[in-house]
Image (spheres, rainbow, N blue to C red):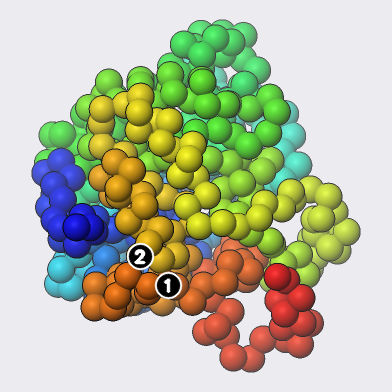
Amino acid sequence: MSALFTPYQLGPVTLRNRTIRSAAFESMGRAFGPTEQLKEYHVAVARGGIGMTTLAYAAVSRSGLSFDKQLWLRPAIVPGLRDITDAVHREGAAAAIQIGHCGNMTHYSTAGQIPIGASSGFNLYAYTPVRGMRRSEIAEVARDFGRAVRTARDAGFDSVEVHAGHGYLISQFLSPYTNRRRDEYGGSLENRMRFMRMCLEEAVGAARSCGMAVTVKHNMYDGFRGGIEIPESLEIAREIERFGVDGIVLTGGFVSKAPMAVMRGLIPIYTMSYYSPWWLRYFIRWCGPWMIRQYPFEECYFLEDAKKFRAALKCPLIYVGGLVSREGIDRALDAGFELVQMARALVNDPAFVEKLRTGDASTRSACDHRNYCIARMYSVDMKCCKHCPDLPRKIVEELERLP
């Protein structure tokens, strides 16, 4: 029998089933705080049967902000977040929040300073210069992770997910592609893991003292030559495991180098340019096909690599990546993963999990992975094209051309 609709004990939190709404950026905040739109979306997902829903991309400090629609997890927004968590709990779901720092993917206008990262340089994808972090900043940002966890608890969250993947700040220290430091934070893998250990020590310690669950999103690979590959990633995962986390979310890809390795499927370039600032539109149309490598979509696209981690680790593992059917979810659970995460299937239909529960084994999401939702995600909000009846003609034509 499938474990899908059996309860699961995630640390101190009991989930009603094995499903989690993954921390895909909703782009539904305003002035770095929550909105009624953000609340309505997560309440809809909770009402739709999810075990736990995750608010995405919350920065642990001002310096970690990349978008004005992104959450900055601070005491000022606790009442608004508490309104969301209370509403989610009334629907029977648990509430989680992803915490992280965008590092070299931030902007002066949002972060209030020149973007910081593991090393100095220029981020072509964020079109900004970057300054390597000083030792004092490294220690302070690590402490910010602990403070963010305590703020999340004040806001009523049951769990936090530490974002250590996808090319954001922790990942920038881990990856040799972005970490060119010559001090104790760079060079060997042992040194490159130092910042991650500092962040986890703060976050896990705070979570334990607050009675919260804590998970970590971790890259199995960066998705390009010169980045982290599976052998190094396994060593990093073992280090994460030693902190006694309640789960590791296995993912892959680097948003500033191989963004579609994270999400897979074709990206509609014209659509992305349409929703971008006017000064960026033609750059995306001309350079986008060259800069953004396309990856074909297939269900459970991370599963075979994730099985290597399942064989090497003892801690609970959470599978994410291309889950669009009951059959795919059961494949992941049968492979030994304790929980599954999904996002686009829930953008298409927030009630997808409930339909799985009341339907049959052939239930499949109507999401076709043409990735309109991703093309508009950072500029407007994350919304499925099937919920947008008045799309411009050129966007409709582009989406129809995609296989």
Q: Where is residue 400 in the image (x, y as percent from the top left)?
A: 72, 79
Contact between labelled residues 2 and 1, with CB atoms less than 8 Å apart: yes
Quadrant location, the N terminus: bottom left
Q: Where is residue 196 in the image (x, y as percent from the top left)?
A: 41, 25
* Res. 355 visible in picture: yes
**Going by the image, does 276 lie left or right of 103?**
right
Question: Which residue lies at the image location 28% right of the left edge and 58% below the top edge?
Answer: 19
Q: 314 and 105: which one is in front? A: 314
Q: In which quarter of the image is residue 132?
A: top right
Q: Residues within 10 Å of mark 2 (few under 14, many from 20)?
A: many
Above-or-below relation of 4 to 131 = below
Question: Which residue lies at the image location 59% right of the left edge and 91% below the top edge?
Answer: 389
Identify the secondary structure beneath mark 2. helix
Rounded to the nearest angstrom, the CA distance separating label 1 from label 2 is: 7 Å
Q: Quadrant of residue 6?
A: bottom left
Q: 57 and 129: which one is in front? A: 57
Question: What amino acid does circle 1 point to?
Answer: Arg
- Disc 2 designates what residue? 326
Question: What amino acid does circle 2 point to?
Answer: Arg
- Disc 1 designates what residue? 364
Identify the secondary structure beneath mark 1. loop
Q: Earlier in the sequence, mark 1 or mark 2?
A: 2
Above-or-below relation of 71 to 370 = above
Q: How crowded is mark 1: few (under 14 residues within 10 Å), some or many (20 or more)?
A: some
* Res. 56 visible in picture: no
Q: Where is residue 80 in the image (x, y as percent from the top left)?
A: 28, 66
Q: 127 and 321: which one is in front? A: 321
**Going by the image, does 357 lie left or right of 342?**
left
Q: 114 and 5: which one is in front? A: 5
Question: Which residue lies at the image location 57% right of the left edge and 72% below the top edge?
Answer: 368
**Going by the image, does 227 lie left or right of 140?**
right
